[in-house]
Amino acid sequence: MAQHLLTTNPILAEKIATALRCSLSETPRALHEVLRFLFLSCQHGRPLTPSHVIDLAWHEWILFTRAYTQFCQAQFGRYMHHTPGGRTEENLERYQLTLQLYEARFGTPDPNFWPPVSSDCGACETLKPT
């Protein structure tokens, strides 16, 4: 899925690579992890917090508004909102929950994309639609 999104939105790979300061060859994996985060968020139904790396890649993906909206509608039946998170403590708690849900669904998270809780988490979260 990530590779298809990058093929249909070729500039997205460059944007993610620049934001993450990584090679173009690493962008499919980064976007794949963003998609996993969105899946977990949709399934959980409550706000979750991504890692800082995933948050940066998500920022780039969401800027492709038409493609992002179409993807969310097709995959989740709704738009997956993105908003700045709350207090640091809340973000760390949500990030811990995100890691627990990730491990239960996908196995051990790659620390390159999902560092331990003691590390910086993203400052953004998914929100339920109003």
Image (cartoon, rainbow, N blue to C red):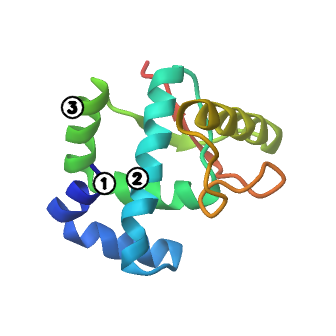
Separation of residues labelled 2 and 1 (CA atoms): 5 Å
Q: Which residue is mark 2?
A: 32
**Residues packed near mark 3 inside 10 Å, few (<14), some (14 to 19) or many (20 plus):** few
Give the residue displayed 70% in from the left and 32% down from the top.
Answer: 97
Amino acid type at mark 2: His
Q: Position of residue 119 (x, y in %)?
A: 79, 57
Separation of residues labelled 2 and 3 (CA atoms): 16 Å
Residue 82 drawn above or below residue 101: below
Q: Secondary structure at mark 1?
A: helix
Residue 6 drawn above or below residue 126: below
Horizontally, is 35 left or right of 120 in the view?
A: left
Residue 106 drawn above or below residue 120: above
Residue 108 sits in which quadrant?
top right
Horizontally, is 103 left or right of 96 in the view?
A: left
Q: Is residue 78 visible?
A: no
Q: Position of residue 88 (x, y in %)?
A: 79, 45
Instruction: Between label 1 and label 3, give the one nearer the viewer.
Output: 1
Q: Secondary structure at mark 3?
A: helix
Callout 2–callout 1 Cβ contact below 8 Å: yes
Q: Which residue is mark 3?
A: 74
- The front one of 99 and 87 is 99
Sequence-earlier tag: 2 or 1: 1
Give the residue displayed 62% in from the left and 64% down from the top.
Answer: 112
- Can you tell which mark lies on residue 2? 1
Sequence-earlier tag: 1 or 3: 1
Amino acid type at mark 1: Ala
Amino acid type at mark 3: Ala
Q: Position of residue 28 (x, y in %)?
A: 36, 63
Q: Is residue 4 visible?
A: yes
Horizontally, is 93 left or right of 128 in the view?
A: right
